[in-house]
Image (cartoon, helix red, strand yellow):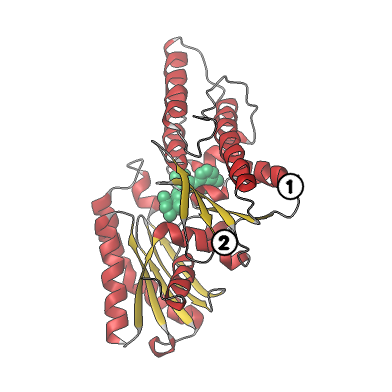
Amino acid sequence: MIVLGVETSCDETAVSIVKDGKEVLANIVYSQIAIHQEFGGVIPEVASRHHVLKITYVLEAALKKANLEAKDIDLVAVTSTPGLIGSLMVGVNAAKAFALANEIEYIEVNHLIGHIYANYIEKDFVFPLLALVVSGGHTELVLMKDHYQFEILGQTLDDAVGEAYDKVGRVLDLPYPAGKPLDDLALMGDATYNLPYVYLDKDSYNFSFSGLKSAVLNLVNSTKQKGEAINKANLAASFQNSVVSVLVSKTIKAALEYKVKQIIVAGGVAANKGLRAKLKEAVSKIPNLELTFPKFEYCTDNAAMIAVAGYFKYKLQVK
Ligand code: KG4
Ligand code: ZN
């Protein structure tokens, strides 16, 4: 079964073609990052307009790359939520029009479920599994007992992890999106700054990152006011250490409590090298527990993950 995926929920215009939920035949991503960088964040109106300008070209490029025609596509899957409403509409309308004009089946997919299914490209799922979803807009621990069955064990009460990275990166004068540069900087420093580690209630699988973010912003401001210099690499390392320690600790606790056989990590922050290393180390101490990360190109927004999620949703006839 050949699925064409479409993703326009934020600032990436993406079309991908995936065979049987596994084999990526084309993965075209037109990133608007350079356009939004000068504003230090995504401007929704600008994002929608660029999706309109690019979507047809990206769709044609995907078909060309896969060496396929519209008649070869069995299903069109598109991100319908969550995301920037104007941006989502561009992808949904383009996908619907393409499906209708070529008499192809059409299905709508949740963006976060897409992030989870990015892992399937890398490895088959072994249930029960635990998904740590860490993106720019969401932070969740999700238990899956089977395909397309999701139970949210916990989530952030305020900022998402990616959001905290972007805001902390901004005060450290890093370019938007700051996740990767902050991760790179953290690896060059030592965690010497005293920052909060927010575990909330011991039994809770919820998260909170706004206090940590505020602590970093206050520290930068008060240091500047005193005319002292910040050691940016050490501050980045301290911030990353706090985030990663909390994420890994809650993920491992949930994995043991629910006796999962596999942990998968989803969303842009799944690319974080500090998180990958610490989680790998923790999982290696637990017998019969697999750990899967998507390839770097499938961590941040892409349409291959949407095609894979669409494939399963269609096959299982999920409403
Ligand atoms: O999943 P994603 O592409 O978009 C949403 O669905 O929100 O995630 C984007 C987020 C941004 O906040 C970006 O700064 C963060 O992922 N990110 C990272 C890294 N690479 C991307 N955060 C930490 N470390 C990274 N290496
Ligand atoms: Zn995303």
Q: Report whether residue 20 is seen.
A: yes
**Quarter of the image where the C terminus is located:** bottom left
**Residue sticking out furthest to the bottom:** 71
Q: Which residue is located at x 62 percent, y 21 percent?
A: 192
Q: How many marks?
A: 2
Dividing the image into four equal quarters, which quarter contains ligand 2?
A: bottom left
Residue located beneath label 2 in the image: 119
Amino acid identity at mark 1:
Ile
Q: Position of residue 246 (x, y in %)?
A: 57, 35
Q: Which residue is located at x 58 percent, y 67 percent?
A: 121
Q: Position of residue 98 (x, y in %)?
A: 31, 80
Residue 176, compared with residue 263, is above or below; it is above
Q: Position of residue 263 (x, y in %)?
A: 61, 53
Q: Are marks 2 and 1 in contact (CB under 8 Å)?
A: no
Q: Which residue is located at x 57 percent, y 66 percent?
A: 120
Residue located beneath label 1 in the image: 286
Give the secondary structure at mark 2. Answer: helix
Could you say which is closer to the camera, residue 151 or residue 41? Answer: 151
Q: Which residue is located at x 40 percent, y 80 percent?
A: 75
Q: Is residue 85 left or right of residue 265?
A: left
Give the secondary structure at mark 1. Answer: loop
Q: Residues within 10 Å of mark 1 (few under 14, many from 20)?
A: few
